[in-house]
Image (spheres, coloured by chain):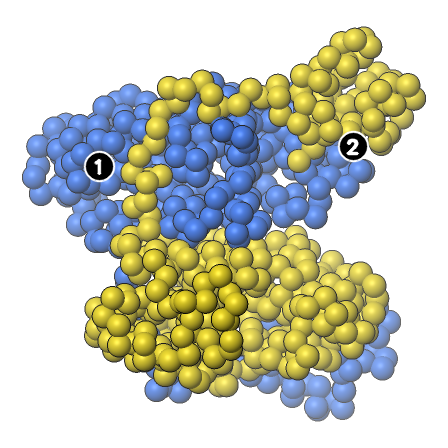
Chain colours: A blue, B yellow
Amino acid sequence: EVKYILDIRDFSNHPDAKLFTKDVNAILDDPEITAVVEAMGGSHPAYDFSLEALKRSKSVITSNKEVVANFGAELLETAKENGVKYLFEASVGGGIPIIRPLLSSLCGNDVISVAGILNGTTNFIINEMQTKNSGFFDALKIAQENGYAERDPSADIDGLDAARKICILSAIVFGQIVSPDKIHVEGIRNVTPRDIQDADRSGYALRLLGVAERAVDGAYIFVCPFFVKKDCLLAGVKGVTNGIRVVGNAVGELHFTGAGAGKLPTASALVCDVMDAVGGDPSDNKNRAEWKKDVSEDFLKDFSERRGRTYLRFASVSESAAALLGAEIITPDALITSEFSESELDAILEKNSLKPISRIRVF
Amino acid sequence: EVKYILDIRDFSNHPDAKLFTKDVNAILDDPEITAVVEAMGGSHPAYDFSLEALKRSKSVITSNKEVVANFGAELLETAKENGVKYLFEASVGGGIPIIRPLLSSLCGNDVISVAGILNGTTNFIINEMQTKNSGFFDALKIAQENGYAERDPSADIDGLDAARKICILSAIVFGQIVSPDKIHVEGIRNVTPRDIQDADRSGYALRLLGVAERAVDGAYIFVCPFFVKKDCLLAGVKGVTNGIRVVGNAVGELHFTGAGAGKLPTASALVCDVMDAVGGDPSDNKNRAEWKKDVSEDFLKDFSERRGRTYLRFASVSESAAALLGAEIITPDALITSEFSESELDAILEKNSLKPISRIRVF
């Protein structure tokens, strides 16, 4: 149950107008409040409000990487002292589950390194430069026009946003928080189309990575552009998507990718943290605890009704057969149909005495 | 603390010989045992032992997809009735964290679909067919020689292994378990090199996918080969690696990839489940609860000491400069150095008055 929404702007015409307050103390003083979601951005007053909420034994859930990277150690300690939680899955990688898997699914590993495309804006710019062979400032302008970059884009393009995120990931895997202002950070302002072409020509893709690598008695933690081999999955992460590669001594190499920003992906991460904070272990939910057996025939849908496009190869393909299938001919004897259900396709093939040698669905 | 290891073979010369027992009742009857790891494979007696352990209030952790897919509903119910856990992260995707993220990190989503490369053997065979243009049986033989395929490979190549795994994932996201023997399953026995080439030529990669898609009042659940667009990350999953794509209504598209089998990745997943079973919420571990602040200068290593290869571009490159840098020349004015620390590279560049226009590290 959401009891308050704190915002200094006027929402008197909002359907939930009665929930809005401009006074943080209304929330902090209310003993019914067990958890607070902080999605304000910036260090102050977000940090101050979070600290106060934790001191009053309210869990705090945040998407604010600036606060987590700079004040996380203190806020975690305060949470622990007060028997509540400080949770921040949404602060790195948007909706990608990364904080929780690092904590709960890799606990049997020593993590050797974490490296990731942690900033969607710069990844969009790099891809724009690559596909359109445009310069950095032209690509930045397109990112701004598409709402992927702020009017003042420096936190993104100069690497500070990625620096905050790699410091958070590093703290998760190494148990030590390093301030983003202490690490080596290079952004993409000086990357040229030529660099990107050279990468491409020699089997690499240029990517801005935040990296935390275990070293003897410590770690290298830094942000800079990299040439990434094309067979590494990070090279396949395009546009505003984020991707994170984790290497564990037992599990080997893992990759996690998904939307790194956006209101719904961020909300997805925040909501799970809220459920964790207020409802106990979210993995103990109904799905794990109870699986209905398929007593009903209804649940599993008949595969013959599934619709999709299909690759078909014949001894030879006639124009008329291709037309019947609404198909794109891809070689003299193979085509990809337009969308049919399995049974519709069966019927067309049978009616026209078409006998494919191969039939493979298109994903 | 590991108290027993159940195995019918002789381990009298093993360093842990005293832990071995051939009698399951030694374990079941011992009230000190709180959790049992079942990694036997096969339905029986693995299911029977698991059921009995749960009935005696011992949590069971398993990598056995056959048992989970066929008896998971009953075992979960028994676990719940007895106040213990039945955990099976290792049963799908080897060491890839997938079960736990689906349960605990996507709890604010309706999952729309799950699709994955769930069997490493078949993915290896497909890649072998693609890169060497070899036929199915030749590729299978190489998989067997490399230990990636069993002597009787039918559970892999005919899709049953993938079917069990997609039924487990489907149960996790839809809350209903469907028997693997009820779903549509096609393996890769009939896939030809020509199909793989046609995929490649038309912008796809051929992959064997297990798929669970939400439909009105139910779901399509099936296994078959697919043409997957090359810009989908599943197309980039090579060799014995597994990859899983999850689409949620809030989070959008996520990908998880990693080693789908192997003793250490499987152990990684089992160990975390054990920690969950015996030690409470594994996400409440030391790393989350406490971050040391970087009071010591030692932890963050000096970036200038980090070693790696570097792309350098100059106004022009001389053969002698390239030789100094142990470099591979990639264009008339650009090269990739051999491995140096940052400071070693700085020193060579300065000593020889080499002033790069671009300097980008190789990942």
Q: Is residue A111 above or below residue B151?
A: above
Res B262 visible: yes
Taking depth in this image into account, of B38 and B276 the one nearest to the observer is B38
Residue shown at 78% from the left, 32% from the top: A198
- Say yes or no: labels 2 and 1 on the same chain: yes
Give x and y (percent) for residue A80.
22, 37
- Whether pointer 2 and pointer 1 mark residues with C-beta atoms closer than 8 Å, the reply is no
Work out how far the residue at label 2 is from the one at label 1, CA to CA, in angstroms: 50 Å
> Circle 2 sits in a helix, a strand or a loop, which is it?
helix
Which numbered disc covers residue A80? 1
**Label whose residue precedes the other's in the sequence (2 or 1):** 1
Name the mark nearer the viewer: 2 or 1: 1
Q: Is residue B294 left or right of residue A149?
A: left
**Residue with the most extreme front position:** B13
Res B172 visible: no
Q: Is residue B362 left or right of residue A141?
A: right
